[in-house]
Image: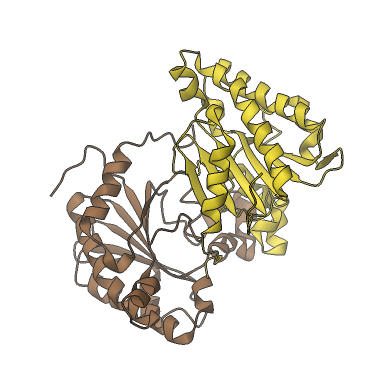
Chain colours: A brown, B yellow
């Protein structure tokens, strides 16, 4: 286990490249998602060991649900499987996404309130059927925000804190709608390998890179 | 002049590294901003030639105004100088920022409504004393958003469209509060050189890179 003089409090993960990985392997695109499960669990275990306080994972988005049904079913299942695994571990889990849509997996409804598994200790936020616009407009519901004057307080993701480091797998250098408000000051590290090819060395390199960044929070 | 098969409609520019550049040259930190003017004007001219439809430049932010007064004065002056230059060119300029604060340069107040210079033709958005939180909360003023239900429509930057490509100079891989909503799907290209060392080749490399990106808008 390596050690770091400064570790991020909150890491965001964009696990991209499942379909490209599957295609490259000669599999069907939808088969990529199952192979994305192991990486997520390994990364979670590593965060536990490192003492990371909060971890946010991009499950799937409202935008993603425009894809073929067979793919949608595959990434929905991967999300449910991931939560079933976590339920036997230590985590304070919150699933965040638009539950009023048919694309939200019903099995995950109980976790849309933060739920302690085991001894808890690490906040795990899992974005499932998440939409940045849905998140933002949540604060306009019932005119709730008009009274406080602070949009951020009324967002669906208000319980998710500012992100220090975002790591994206699959080579894309974009946020693709990932928590725009929590990401405003985040350092953004891109891993060229596809997510199913996750290796702890990639994660370590991101943390090493993060240590060399000068954190100013925009100042 | 190079040609590109696909150019971004809207480019965002984060011109970072002025102070580090000045320090490296043995100058005072505040002297970096004046040297950031030439790059901005060259980049603007290049966007005109390429037929870019919209260009957003990060002037300075509410976060930046925590710096020493001598630096604040220097970047305020650079912003006013930039607008004076543009006034003799072709552009549809909009200056966006918190005008209710003492840090907003009074000389720029007339341009907080979009103003045509010459024949116009390129939308130039200039963020001056801009704050992401200010921008967002603008839609909560007078409960305006509560009626429409769409936060984005009420934001101070509602007239600025979705960004296709963000180019940041100075090596930082973060948005630092730059238009979080318009940036949700943007491809993010980082130039390691400091902004005063701007060279058109850096801009061309960003455009070449952009052409190879697979634009999905999150889908």
Horizontally, residue A146 falls left or right of residue A193, namely right
Determine whether A191 is above or below B201 in the image.
below
Residue A196 to residue B141: above or below: below
Q: Which residue appears at 55% of the width and 39% of the height?
A: B201
In this rendered view, identify the residue nearer to me: A109 or A132. A132
Q: Quadrant of residue B84?
A: top right
* Residue B206 image position (x, y, % from top left): 54, 47
Residue depicted at x 19% and y 66% = A118
Percent x, y of residue A42: 21, 64
Q: Is residue A99 left or right of residue B74?
A: left
In the visual, does B115 lie left or right of B100?
A: right
Residue A159 location, x and y as percent? 42, 56
Image quarter for residue B90? top right
| Residue at the front extreme, as displayed | B1
Displayed quadrant of residue A17 = bottom left
Pick whichever, B99 or B208, lies toward us.
Answer: B208
Q: Nearer the viewer, residue B85 or B158?
A: B85
The outermost residue toward the left is: A1
- Residue A44 percent location from the top left of the image: 24, 61
Q: Residue at x 41, y 80 (%)?
A: A105
User: Can I make out residue B85 in this image?
Assistant: yes
> B95 or B32: which is nearer to us?
B32
Q: Residue at x 52, y 26 (%)?
A: B18
Query: In this figure, what is the number of numbered marks?
Result: 0
Q: Is residue B147 above or below residue B132?
A: below
- Can residue B186 be seen here? no
């Amino acid at each position: 286990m390596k050690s770091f003089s400064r570790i991020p409090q909150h890491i965001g993960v964009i696990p991209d490249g499942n379909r490209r990985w599957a295609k490259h392997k000669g599999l069907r695109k939808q088969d990529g998602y199952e192979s994305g499960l192991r990486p997520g669990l390994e990364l979670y275990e590593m965060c536990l060991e490192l003492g990371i306080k909060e971890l946010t994972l991009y499950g799937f988005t409202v935008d993603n649900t425009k894809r073929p049904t067979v793919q949608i079913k595959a990434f929905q299942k991967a999300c449910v499987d991931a939560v079933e695994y976590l339920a036997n571990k230590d985590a304070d889990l919150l699933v965040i996404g638009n539950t009023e849509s048919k694309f939200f997996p019903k099995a995950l409804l109980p976790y849309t309130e933060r739920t302690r598994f085991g001894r808890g200790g690490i906040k795990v936020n899992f974005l499932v059927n998440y939409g940045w616009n849905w998140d933002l407009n949540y604060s306009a519901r019932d005119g709730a925000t008009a009274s406080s004057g602070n949009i951020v307080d009324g967002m669906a993701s208000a319980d998710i804190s500012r992100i220090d480091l975002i790591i994206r797998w699959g080579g894309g250098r974009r946020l693709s709608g990932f928590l725009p408000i929590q990401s405003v000051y985040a350092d953004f590290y891109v891993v060229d390998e596809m997510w199913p090819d996750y290796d702890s060395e990639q994660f370590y390199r991101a943390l090493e890179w993060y240590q060399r960044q000068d954190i100013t929070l925009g100042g």
